[in-house]
Image (cartoon, helix red, strand yellow):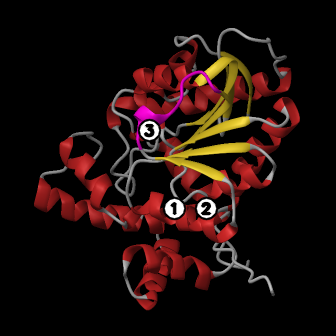
Amino acid sequence: MQTVFFDPLSSQADMAGLISEVTGIPVEEVNQRLENENRNIGSSVKAAFKEAVKTHGAQRFVYNEAMERFYEKTDSFLYELAVWNLNGLKQDMGAWCCDWITRRLGSSRVLSIGDGMGFECLRIAEAGHDVTYFEVPGYCAEFANLLFKRKRAEVHQITDPEKIPSREFDAIICLDVLEHIPDPPSFVEMLKSYLRPGGVFIVHAPFYMIHPNYPTHVAASRKFSGSLKLYTDAGFRVLDGRLLWNPVVLQAPGGKRLSSSVLGKFRLMLGKPYLMTGRESVKPFRIIHKIKRKHQHWFGT
C-alpha cells in the first residue's frame, strides 16, 4: 500500500483540511482565515476576543470566568497557532528543546503542557521519547488528537489535570503558556509535582507581550518578565538557556545533579535587563514582534 504523505506544516491543504474537519468550517473559509492571520499575526484571537468583550463582558489582559469561557468556545487559537508553528523562531525553539533533551537526558519521559495543536509533541515523539500531551479541552486538543492519529505518533493525551501522574516525568516542556495563567507561582509549583526528583523544566514565557493582538495574556504577570525568581522560589536551579529566554532550562530539587552550561547562564544574564523593561514598557514586544515578522514563513517556503 502506498503511504500518503501528510504534513500540515508544509502543506496548506493538509492544515486547512484538518482545521475544517475539527471545526466544520468550509476549507475555503479556513484558508482565508489562515491567510488573514499570516498578514496580521494575532488578529484572529484579537477579533474573536473583541466579540467576547461585547457579549460576555470579557476584559483584555484580565483572567476571569469570561476569559475561561472564551478559551472553551473559540476556534481562533487554531489560526494563531497554525501560523506561529510555521514561524522560524518557533521551529528553532522547538528543535532546540528537543535536541537538549535528547543530548542531555537521553530517551526520556516528557510531559508537554499547553502544546495546543500538538506539533512539539509530535517532534519529540518522533525523536524517540515517551511523550504525554496535556491541553485543556477544545478545538486545539481535537486537532492534536487527529494529528497524532494521521501521523501514527504514539503520544499520550490528557485533558484533565487530575489525571497527570505525579513525580513520573524526566522533563516538562511549557512554551508560551505561563503568560496566560492567573497565578504563575502556583502553576510552577504544580508542574514541579509532576517531575521526578532532579527532573528538568524547559520554559518560555513572554510576560512582556501585553498588546491588543494578545488579549489573553495576563497584565498582572508582567512583573515576572526578566525574573528567574518565579522558578528559583519553587526550588528550581538554572541549567541553561538562550538570550531572550526562549527557553530557560531548570532542574528540580533532588535526584542526580546535572551540570549547568556556563555559556547558557551567561546568555540569560545578558538578556535579563532587556526583558526586565517589559515590566513597564512595550519596547520588548515591539522589537521582538518585528523579529517575529521577519522569520514568518508560509507553507512550503
Q: Amino acid at mark 2?
A: Asn
The quadrant in which residue 289 appears is bottom right
Which residue has dot 2 on it?
85
Q: Distance of mark 1 from mark 2, alpha carbons?
A: 6 Å
Q: Residue at x 44, y 38 (%)?
A: 179
The quadrant in which residue 201 appears is top right
Name the residue nearer the viewer: 116 or 296. Answer: 116
Find out whether residue 11 is within the magenta segment.
Answer: no
Question: Is 218 above or below relative to 253?
Answer: below
Q: Position of residue 44 (x, y in %)?
A: 38, 68
Q: Which residues are magenta?
A: 160-168
Q: Amino acid at mark 3?
A: Glu
Q: Which mark is residue 235?
A: none
Q: Position of residue 142 (x, y in %)?
A: 46, 63
Where is the N terminus found, in terms of image quarters? Answer: bottom right
Question: Is 143 above or below relative to 57?
Answer: below
Q: Is residue 135 visible?
A: yes
Whether label 1 touches label 2, CB < 8 Å: yes
Q: Position of residue 120 (x, y in %)?
A: 65, 52
Q: Position of residue 216 (x, y in %)?
A: 34, 48
Which residue has dot 3 on it?
179
Q: Amino acid at mark 1?
A: Leu
Q: Distance of mark 1 from mark 3, alpha carbons?
A: 15 Å
Name the residue nearer the viewer: 228 or 168. Answer: 168
User: The residue tagged with tag 2: helix, strand or loop?
Assistant: helix
Q: Which mark is residue 81?
A: 1
Q: Earlier in the sequence, mark 1 or mark 3?
A: 1
Q: Is residue 92 visible?
A: no
Whether label 2 touches label 3, CB < 8 Å: no
Q: Residue at x 46, y 35 (%)?
A: 163
Where is the C terminus found, in terms of image quarters? Answer: bottom right
